[in-house]
């Protein structure tokens, strides 16, 4: 999963979440990211960890039978 960009994160978000939920996900501190907002990590170039956490969040919500919004 090398060479991910912020566009990969945004693309996955746009496919799996409504716009408002995606925006909130990016701006809300996340426990899996040391209580930092995913957007802050993306701005620092830490895209791969954000992508992995996003995939995990989406997969866990899908397993629970709820939409990731």
Image (tube, rainbow, N blue to C red):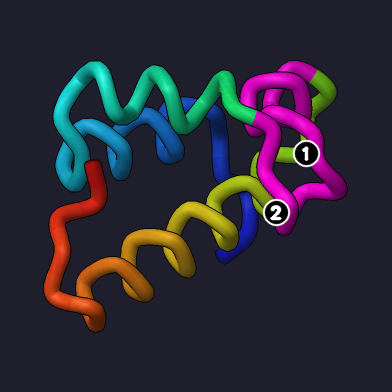
Residue 23 location, x and y as percent?
38, 18
Camera-side residue of 43 and 25: 25
- Taking 62 as reference, is 46 left or right? right
Q: 5 and 62: which one is in front? A: 62
Examine the structure image and report whether residue 46 is included in the region drawn in magenta.
no
Q: Give the range drawn in magenta.
A: 29-43
Residue ID for mark 1: 46
Residue linked to disc 2: 49
- Position of 8 with respect to 40 (left or right) is left
> Main SS of the magenta segment?
helix
Quadrant into which the C terminus falls: top left
Q: Quadrant of residue 55?
A: bottom left
Q: Is mark 1 on a helix, strand or loop?
A: loop
Residue 36 percent coordinates (x, y): 79, 33
Residue drawn at the location 56% of the way across and 65% of the way down: 1
In the image, residue 11 sits, relative to residue 27, either above or below, namely below
Residue sticking out furthest to the bottom: 63
As helix, strand or loop, the secondary structure at mark 2 comes to helix
Q: Is residue 20 above or below residue 9?
A: above
Among the 4 quarters of the image, the one containing residue 47: top right
- In magenta stretch: residue 35: yes
- Percent of width and height locating residue 30: 67, 43
Q: At 25% from the left edge and 18% from the top edge, which residue is drawn?
A: 20
Which residue is painted at 72% across and 58% down in the image? 32
At 75% from the left and 21% from the top, the residue drawn is: 40
Label pair 2/1, CB-CB below 8 angstroms: yes
Q: How crowded is mark 2: few (under 14 residues within 10 Å), some or many (20 or more)?
A: some
Where residue 35 sits: x, y (%)?
A: 80, 41
Q: Distance between the residues labelled 2 and 1?
A: 6 Å
């Amino acid at each position: 999963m090398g060479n991910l960009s912020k566009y990969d994160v945004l693309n996955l978000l746009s496919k799996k979440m409504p716009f408002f939920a995606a925006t909130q996900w990016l701006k809300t501190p996340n426990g899996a990211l040391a209580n930092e907002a995913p957007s802050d990590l993306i701005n620092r170039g830490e895209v791969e960890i954000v992508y992995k956490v996003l995939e995990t969040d989406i997969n866990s919500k899908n397993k629970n039978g709820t939409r990731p919004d």
